[in-house]
Image (cartoon, grey):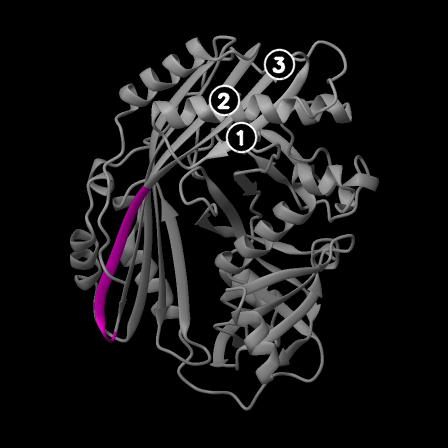
């Protein structure tokens, strides 16, 4: 990575004034603008040293209601002329649509925002690539490979009905690998501030998870699987995208479409979207400006609702959840899987004779109705006598998340926190867990290649 020239983001006040001007001059009956300005960085420290890059940009989504028709347009430019043109393009889009039934209006949630923990870290916001390289270089050089991603964002939502929401936010995630090869210890953590990333704790976890000895191979029959919190987060993200999103539900590909109010998972499984919980990566509102609140998505194993924005909720006859990600979709960006009470030792005892998986990469869903997936399992260790034993080879794992979460999973008390894919709006908080026996298969060359293309 090499440093790239960057452009400073407009201040939140300047961005707010720009949106006010565009709204005043919009010829549409109603206009909404979601404005996102982001400085995004990535750094890597390995045997070749530390290097980092940083770039800045903005995007705006304009949505209009004109003569009862809705239109939208996204632009990567953020000056007044580009936004005015985006309004015109959105109006043009609306004129090829059928009028919406009833009396449509853009949302205008007046609920006061919940009190938030610290959302913005001035140190991260001012970082240059050189700062990131120096920070990464300060980490112990004992065979560690460390990757850091960080972002600062300005988020504004405004519409002609008087809605005004704004926030400045940062996010960072450190992922560490201790030693290459099978059994290499891996760990990660995300936070709003650099200090809360807790680099030393991440490094210690990666070292502790490293398996020094290579095993003879993988078991030929299914064995219990214990997932590190980072691996659980990856599975929770899959569940979120293919089962809980508004698009999956409305298109009928989500298993929730036929199972709302029906217990399909174990009663220990509770999943919610909660942008108010400081244990996660809290954020005060969604991209319609709706105030965040706790929303039960799965309660005691029973699906309660998909993630919905206000328009989708009205179309489907369900309550909105405050999960708009703009672009006519909704997703739980503050996903929290409730922990259990089992200690790490309890999980290893329950899964004795099985395999511990430290990391999952390249997850893809192969059957959305049964939540079947395939993934590359890394950092695999044998479990013997209730403790982590020798390393096992990286493996291909094919299984069903529906099965794993319905056959008496044991949820741990320790949790992992990963950034959402945008890098700043939220994240996934999930616990370690022991799940039903599964078969981890040796990799062949084609499996490795197919999986790597999705990492």
Q: Residue at position x 43%, y 10% from top?
A: 25
Q: CA distance from mark 2 to mark 3?
A: 11 Å
Viewer-proximal residue among 47 and 161: 161
User: Local crowd at mark 1 within 10 Å, few (<14), some, or many (≥20)?
Assistant: many
Residue 55 lies in the magenta-colored region: yes
Q: Quadrant of residue 296?
A: top right
Q: Residue at position x 65%, y 40% from top?
A: 245
The residue under label 3 is 66
* Residue 193 location (% of width, % of height): 29, 41
User: Local crowd at mark 3 within 10 Å, few (<14), some, or many (≥20)?
Assistant: many
* SS for dot 3: strand
Q: Residue at position x 51%, y 74% from top?
A: 380
Q: CA distance from mark 1 to mark 2?
A: 7 Å
The residue under label 2 is 87
User: Local crowd at mark 2 within 10 Å, few (<14), some, or many (≥20)?
Assistant: many
* Residue 7 location (% of width, % of height): 24, 40
Find the magenta span and give its range. Answer: 47-56
Q: Residue at position x 64%, y 83% from top?
A: 219
Counting residues from the N terminus, which is met first, the one under dot 1 or under dot 2?
Answer: 1
Q: Quadrant of residue 244?
A: top right
* Residue 325 higher or lower than 392, as above or below: above
* For residue 203, side relative to residue 101 (left or right): left
Residue 322 visible: no
Q: Are marks 1 and 2 in contact (CB under 8 Å)?
A: yes
* For residue 126, side relative to residue 115 (left or right): left
Residue 301 lies in the magenta-colored region: no
- Quadrant for the N terminus in the image: bottom left
* Residue 163 location (% of width, % of height): 48, 13
The residue under label 1 is 73
* Residue 123 higher or lower than 72, as above or below: below
Q: CA distance from mark 3 to mark 1?
A: 14 Å
Viewer-proximal residue among 434 and 361: 361
């Amino acid at each position: 990575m090499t440093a790239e020239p960057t452009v400073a983001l407009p201040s939140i006040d300047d961005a707010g004034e720009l949106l006010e001007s565009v709204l005043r001059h919009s010829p549409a009956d109603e206009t909404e603008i979601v404005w996102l300005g982001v400085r995004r960085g990535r750094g890597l420290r390995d045997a070749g040293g530390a290097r980092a890059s940083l770039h800045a940009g903005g995007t705006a989504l304009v949505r209009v209601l004109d003569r009862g028709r809705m239109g939208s347009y996204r632009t990567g430019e953020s000056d007044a002329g580009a936004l005015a043109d985006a309004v015109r393009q959105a109006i043009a889009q609306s004129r090829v649509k059928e009028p919406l039934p009833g009396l449509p209006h853009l949302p205008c949630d007046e609920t006061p925002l919940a009190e938030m923990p610290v959302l913005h870290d001035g140190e991260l916001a001012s970082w240059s690539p050189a700062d990131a390289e120096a920070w990464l270089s300060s980490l112990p050089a004992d065979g560690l490979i460390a990757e850091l991603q960080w972002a600062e964002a300005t988020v504004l939502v405004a519409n002609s009905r008087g809605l005004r929401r704004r926030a400045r936010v940062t996010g960072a995630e450190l992922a560490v690998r201790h030693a290459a090869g099978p059994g290499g210890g891996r760990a990660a953590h995300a936070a709003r501030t650099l200090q809360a990333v807790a680099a030393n704790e991440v490094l210690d976890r990666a070292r502790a998870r490293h398996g020094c000895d290579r095993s003879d191979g993988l078991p030929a029959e299914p064995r219990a699987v214990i997932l590190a919190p980072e691996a659980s987060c990856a599975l929770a993200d899959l569940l979120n995208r293919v089962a809980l999103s508004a698009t999956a539900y409305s298109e009928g590909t989500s298993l929730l479409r036929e199972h709302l109010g029906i217990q399909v998972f174990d009663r220990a499984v509770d999943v919610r979207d909660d942008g108010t919980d400081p244990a996660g990566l809290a954020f005060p509102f969604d991209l319609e400006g709706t105030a965040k609140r706790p929303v039960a998505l799965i309660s005691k194993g029973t699906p309660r609702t998909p993630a919905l924005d206000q328009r989708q909720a009205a179309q489907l006859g369900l309550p909105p959840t405050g999960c708009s990600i703009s672009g006519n979709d909704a997703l739980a960006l503050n996903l929290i899987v409730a922990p259990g009470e089992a200690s790490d030792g309890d999980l290893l005892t329950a899964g004795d004779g099985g395999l511990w998986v430290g990391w999952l990469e390249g997850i893809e869903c192969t059957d959305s109705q049964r939540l079947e997936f395939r993934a590359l399992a890394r950092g695999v260790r044998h479990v013997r006598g209730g403790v982590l034993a020798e390393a096992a080879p990286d493996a291909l794992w094919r299984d069903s998340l529906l099965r794993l979460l319905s056959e008496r999973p044991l949820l741990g008390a320790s949790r992992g926190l990963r950034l959402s894919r945008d890098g700043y709006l939220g994240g996934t908080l999930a616990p370690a867990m022991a799940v039903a026996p599964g078969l981890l298969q040796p990799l062949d060359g084609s499996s490795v290649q197919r999986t790597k293309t999705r990492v």
